């Protein structure tokens, strides 16, 4: 698709393409209740398309008849860098667990879709959107059946003794689809309270990082640590 002599109507059509495709990606993120949803992804994709359209078609008319050359790829490179900072805003750490990487990558992907639309390549933008939906949909479900390094991990939980915390731990794990087995417990005093240190093995399809964060938020739990499984 050659847009060297693109009309305003064509530019608006490309912008609409970017808006719709970015919104589709945002709806998928919203349904999965991620930190960045429809509005964020729609704005990122549409904004990237606007910047790309400006860089590709905005300056030649202004510089017509001059000897100044414009490199449209310079703005495209700045879009990639700018969106990288935006994506970093949805990544956070909780203890030694990192969350938000997939959402950050999705924001980056949405910007790429918007840039493809702005550059006059709607077919590529549609293909990229379809591949994104495949990656976070069927492919994500397929990876649940692949061998996971989590199967070689143990969770060590420290909690206050005699307060019913162990029941809450097991109930939380069960509600998240895990099967739990307690391998070893040690009782000790810490901060003037009797506490239990339990080494536990959890098996399930959900990443253990999610369980670690959930257990750490339970009342009576004083510490959660993910470690290698040395009991086999």
Image (spheres, helix red, strand yellow):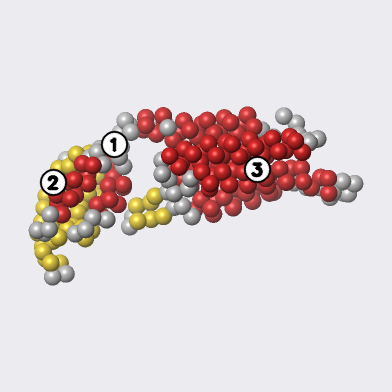
> Would you say residue 119 is visible in this rendering?
no
Q: Residue at x 67, y 45 (%)?
A: 50
Say what secondary structure mark 3 lies in. helix
Q: Residue at x 22, y 46 (%)?
A: 172
Q: Residue at x 14, y 49 (%)?
A: 167
Residue most toward the bottom?
Answer: 192
Q: Which residue is mark 1?
A: 205
Judge by depth and name the residue closer to the eye, 37 or 139. 37
Work out whether mark 2 precedes mark 3 in sequence or the reverse, and give the earlier one. Answer: 3
**Crowd around label 2: few <14 · some 14–19 · many ≥20 (10 Å):** some
Q: Residue at x 56, y 43 (%)?
A: 42
Say what secondary structure mark 2 lies in. strand
* Residue 149 in which image quadrant: top left
Residue 216: give x, y in percent of width and height. Answer: 26, 55
Residue 12: give x, y in percent of width and height. Answer: 71, 38
Does residue 189 sit above or below 117 in this rendering? below
Residue 150: give x, y in percent of width and height. Answer: 28, 41
| Numbered disc in front, either 2 or 3 | 3
Q: Which residue is mark 3?
A: 49
Cα–Cα span, label 2 and label 1: 19 Å
Q: Which residue is mark 2?
A: 182
Cα–Cα span, label 2 and label 3: 54 Å
């Amino acid at each position: 698709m050659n847009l060297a002599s693109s009309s305003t109507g064509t530019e608006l059509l490309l912008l609409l393409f970017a808006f719709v495709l970015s919104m589709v990606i945002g709806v998928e993120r919203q349904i999965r209740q991620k930190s960045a949803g429809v509005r964020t992804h729609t704005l990122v994709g549409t904004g990237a398309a606007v910047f790309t359209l400006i860089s590709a078609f905005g300056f030649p008319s202004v510089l017509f008849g001059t000897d100044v050359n414009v490199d449209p790829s310079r703005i495209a490179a700045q879009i990639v860098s700018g969106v990288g900072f935006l994506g970093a805003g949805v990544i956070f750490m909780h203890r030694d667990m990192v969350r938000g990487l997939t959402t950050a990558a999705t924001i980056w992907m949405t910007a790429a879709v918007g840039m493809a639309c702005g550059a006059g390549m709607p077919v590529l933008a549609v293909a990229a959107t379809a591949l994104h939906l495949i990656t976070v949909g069927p492919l994500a479900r397929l990876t649940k059946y692949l061998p996971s390094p989590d199967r070689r991990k143990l969770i060590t939980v420290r909690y206050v003794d005699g307060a019913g915390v162990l029941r809450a731990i097991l109930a939380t794990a069960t509600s998240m689809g895990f099967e739990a087995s307690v391998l070893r417990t040690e009782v000790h005093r810490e901060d003037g309270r009797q506490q239990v240190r339990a080494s536990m093995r959890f098996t399930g399809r959900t990443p253990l990082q999610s369980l670690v964060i959930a257990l750490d938020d339970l009342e009576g739990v004083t510490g959660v640590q993910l470690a290698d499984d040395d009991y086999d």
